[in-house]
Amino acid sequence: ADDGYKLWLKYDLLKNNTKVAEYKRFSDFIDVQFPISPIIQTAEKELKKGLSGLVGATITKTVKTSGGIVFQKDNALPKEGFKIVAKNGNIVISAQTDKGILYGSFELLRQIQTENSIASINLSSSPKIQLRMLNHWDNVLGTIERGYAGSSLWKWYELPENIDPRYVEYARANASIGINAVVLNNVNASARFLTKEYLEKVKALADVFRPYGIQVFLSINFASPKILGKLKNSDPLEPEVKKWWNDKAKEVYSFIPDFGGFLVKANSEGEPGPQEFGRTHADGANMLAEAVKPFNGLVIWRAFVYGPNPKGDRYKEAFNEFKPLDGQFAKNVIVQVKNGPIDFMPREPFHPLFGAMPKTPLAMEFQITQEYLGFSTNLVFLPSLFKEVLESDTYVNGKGSTVAKVVDGSVHDYPLTAIAGVANTGSDRNWTGHFMSQANWYGYGRLAWNHEISPEQIAEEWTKMTLTKEANSQKIIRNMLLTSRETYVNFTNPLGLHHIMGQNIHFGMEPWLEKSARPDWTAIYYHRADSVGIGFDRTANGSNALGLYSKDVQNQWNNPQTCDLKYLLWFHHVSWNQKLSTGKTLWDELCTRYYTGVTEVEKLQNDWLKVKGNVDEEIFEDVKGRLAAQHREALNWRDACVLYFQTHSKQPIPTPFVKPT
Ligand code: GCW
């Protein structure tokens, strides 16, 4: 039995003997013609482990002229890139850096795990984005904000003395998909992480991750000078505040010489920040940037800000605060923007800041943990969502100025490029709670490395590596993954509905919510259902959030007749009786989607039954149970939303869903 602990790094003996024979021909030795380093040693170790498991090879120290794997230096290749070529009876992995060799080694193992032929392999690859990060929202006491897979992986109480072997497994998994940086702690940051007590623990983790090419960052609390340093305030323009941060940076780097830098959530949801002192986000970021600059550190400043204005439109707030600051940030500052303007919804239009800040490197922030996507009881394959955002066209430099190309620096020539995913990992034995959510961690990493990979390819690779080598089951599972996100949208937020989740825990639905502590955070603020229709008018007649986008984007969305139905209610208040392009009225279409969503969950359940016997038994049972929970939740969503919206539409649920009595 295997309940998923090994993730996609399952090195079980392959059953295809012809393939095994082929791979074995290259598995006699590893010839390291590359300056030795801990990262090179990791690559060697991993290849040995992989090949001994997958093909039963024993790699010896004796180097022969052919029959092995050769590491070679090639300074013409991009920094973290690699080349894998079959040459003179060997497989040559070449790279400029040791990290390139590491990534090339994992790529070779992936080729073998997915049973591709390597006899005449010739492939090269390099990452399109420099910093490929996981952001952990993990707290000092081991809890995880929005974590659904147990408690934090970091056992702070035991660190620095005790190194849980799991830290290494975690680093291997990340390195195998090209993740090269992690932020260890929550953006709602405790100042305590900057104390000597915690820095010693952070150093211990950094030491474990370093041989896997992973750099460590910390989220900081902007009020640390006051909290830890007992200064009278944390005003970024105060000389003693600056000095405090300069000294602190020096201290951090004395523990971790290759420390990445600071991630900052400031003046957002009650977190402290420079605005308390009449300073701007740029003032705050630049002060920190100055402190880490002598050590080549970075400051990653989040743009997730909004205030409670029931008359305003939260959609526009980050844009309005940050756009005017373009050009004012120091060179080692990156501004990190969530994929959409509201908050990690099941479907969101891309954030209007992408394309609007040519002078400020913008990082993409995705959420891998399923805060608004059904926690760990719902199967939702997120590469579909990530890809939809990355492929959205901003049109800022004409057609083809996709969000991906903004983020990878090609649209505005950003000197720094970064992407972050809020991690879905935790202490659960299978790492991610829902076993299938492992595919979201995997898929995020693969897209961070190369945003041109398709969700189809990711689903296929992951299924082969993780679940089964049986062709028909592979096809079924791949298809389940690829349809799952649309299914989730259908039974929760169809046609562009958004933020109608339960207020307190962000799970389930609460479309009837009229009052809350935050006046801009009620469901009715977002869906605006009334006797006439439903949806948030963001055209020029309404909040004009659409006006933040380039003309071509506006044209694509500002006419309710032609606006893509996936975004319809994001931008338009549409009458219940409006005929849509599907031929149905809005009300009928809305009901159809809610009902279809539930039918689709039933299909997921039935499909899963077909793979029984071809996947691990424990995993089979676990996923089966979670799909049953998802079905119950989907019924709740459908019935609650349809019945609630019916109080506004005053129309019957259409046949065939409910037969007229
Ligand atoms: O989605 C919201 C979450 C908060 C989170 C915040 C953020 C870490 O509900 O839990 O805080 O976004 O991204 O800052």
Image (tube, rainbow, N blue to C red):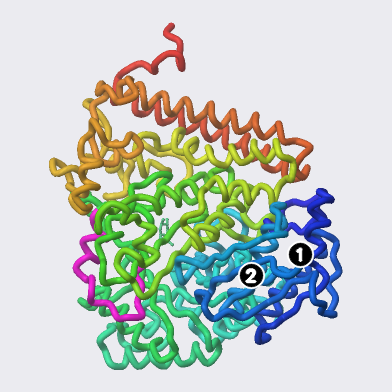
227 or 316: nearer the eye? 316
Q: Is residue 651 above or below residue 590?
A: above
Residue type (three-letter) at the residue carrying disc 1: Gly
The residue sitting at 40% across, 31% down in the picture is: 641
Q: Is residue 275 above or below residue 310?
A: below
Q: Which residue is mark 2?
A: 171
* Residue 94 percent coordinates (x, y): 62, 74
- Label 2 element class: helix
Asked whether mark 2 lies closer than 8 Å to ligand 1, one says no
Q: Is residue 159 left or right of residue 356?
A: right
Asked whether mark 1 lies closer than 8 Å to ligand 1, one says no
C-alpha span from label 1 to label 2: 16 Å
- Label 1 element class: helix
595 or 356: nearer the eye? 356
For the record, the magenta segment spans: 316-335
> Which residue lies most toward the front here?
88
Q: Quadrant of the C terminus?
A: top left
The residue sitting at 80% across, 69% down in the picture is: 67
Picture quarter containing residue 95? bottom right
* Residue 447 percent coordinates (x, y): 50, 57
Q: Which residue is mark 1?
A: 50
- Please rate how many residues cluster around mark 2, counting C-alpha atoms within 10 Å: few if below 14, some from 14 to 19, many from 20: many
Residue type (three-letter) at the residue carrying disc 2: Ala
